[in-house]
Amino acid sequence: MTVSLTFLGGAGTVTGSKYLVRHGGKALLVDCGLFQGYKLLRQRNWRPLPVAPHEIDAVLLTHAHLDHSGYLPLLARDGFGGPVFCTSGTRDLCAILLPDSGHLQEEEAAYLNRHHLSKHEPALPLYTRLDAQHSLALLRTQPAHTPFEPLPGWRATFTRAGHILGAASILLEVGGRRILFSGDLGRPDDLLMCAPDAPPAADTVLVESTYGDRSHPPGSVLDELGPPLARLAARGGVAVVPVFAVGRAQTVLHAIAQLKQRGDLPARLPVYLDSPMAVSTTELFEDHVGEHSLSRAELRAMARGTTLVHSVEESKALARLHGPRVILSASGMATGGRVLHHLALHAGDHRNMIVLTGHQAGGTRGARIANGEKSIRILGRDVEIRAEVVQLATASAHADGGQVLDWLRAMPAAPRRVYVVHGELPAADMLRQRIEYELHWPAEVPEHGDTVAL
Ligand SMILES: [Zn+2]
């Protein structure tokens, strides 16, 4: 009996990851991600899948980022009732991220309706917070390195991918085939996460290529963050750090704790984490010691040096403080969230600093700040940007092209074929070429909707 694989997302793009495996009348979905970014891609979220949700028997999740998990509430609402297997870290993060995603969908629909911006009257949310909460009941956790049966006669094993808390690669054994899904791969030198596990033997590999055409610059987050924050502390300024709730926020907090311990920053420099989601995520690191590279002592040092800001009142109170301080707040590209208030308040003073922690997608406020624009519209008014702007280049949570190749090279034997997924076309195709020329393995970049027999 054949095993077939259909690329329902994450082909030629970094979002919407969904890979459908069929065998013996059963169907299993690996990852269940939302399309994000360009409108052309986001519209795919509204089209029915080529398979009815109730015909899917089980789902496996590599990790909790919405481009891998964010379609689950919709799948469940529209008829999928099977088990969703993931690691406990992924389950805990999904419990934070999915309801928030539903909330944002509801807010967006309400905004469109208020301003009559949609051709649909009324505009509906893709799914609601309640849909997301219901879908969480389907999650079943499995430990890493322990094979389990997602469906009778099918075997799956999670190994650690080192990308974010709970992130896994998945080996799926079915119909005599061994299919390896890399998921998003972390880097071997990450400040927060352990290096990815070496991959197991497989005949088919789906490998991510987010940074397939790039090499990370040398150096560490500590080297990049230390000198600017020391300058800031000396001149008594405020650093505003836009962060995403998962990963980057914890990397920056841990880096600051280490810099204080080394004496590179004043131990008393106040640090505030002003994002309820980031606060919840940071607290999860305590529940998952051993799955990341932070010891309990390092977690304590991080907690001691950070004031967690929960309520809106506490957030507003930060404006009345004096003296140097660092404020981490969402969102990471300054497209929304509490960070806007902090930017509006502090961006106009040359003693202050804006620290951008990662890639800023085109069209976002973060990208305009990175490009050196002198005036930016925030919360309905034009704000002069006189603060020093610092952009971190080393805080990425993805392996670069060479690191992905090294990971593949560690496979016990050459696979029969590699499918290069989860990358924009230039990145995916560059990685494909390197796999063919440097490893001499057959590799291809699949197209959206392609089905292949394995
Ligand atoms: Zn990811």
Image (tube, grey):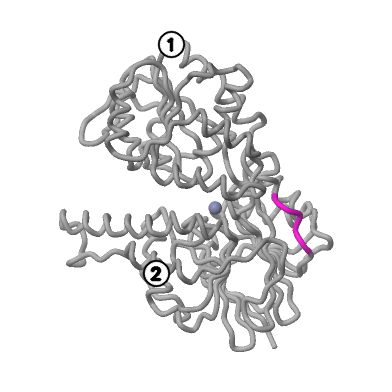
Q: Position of residue 123 (x, y in %)?
A: 22, 64
Residue placed under numbered mark 1 in the picture: 235
**Is disc 2 placed on a helix, strand or loop?**
helix
For this orientation, the residue located farthest to the top is: 235
Q: Where 239 sits versus 336, above or below?
A: above
Say few, some or many: other residues with alpha carbon within 10 Å of mark 1 (under 14 / 14 to 19 / 20 or more). few
Q: Which residues are magenta?
A: 196-200
**Residue 320, numbered label:** none
Q: Position of residue 345 (x, y in %)?
A: 29, 26
**Secondary structure character of the magenta stretch overall:** loop
Residue placed under numbered mark 2 in the picture: 134
Q: Where 65 sits versus 158, above or below?
A: above
For marks 2 and 1, the one nearer the N-term is 2
Image-based side of 223 in relation to 50, left or right: right
Q: Looking at the image, which residue is at 36% across and 37% down?
A: 365
Which amino acid, by three-letter code, is at mark 2? His
Which amino acid, by three-letter code, is at mark 1? Arg
Q: Nearer the viewer, residue 253 or 248?
A: 253
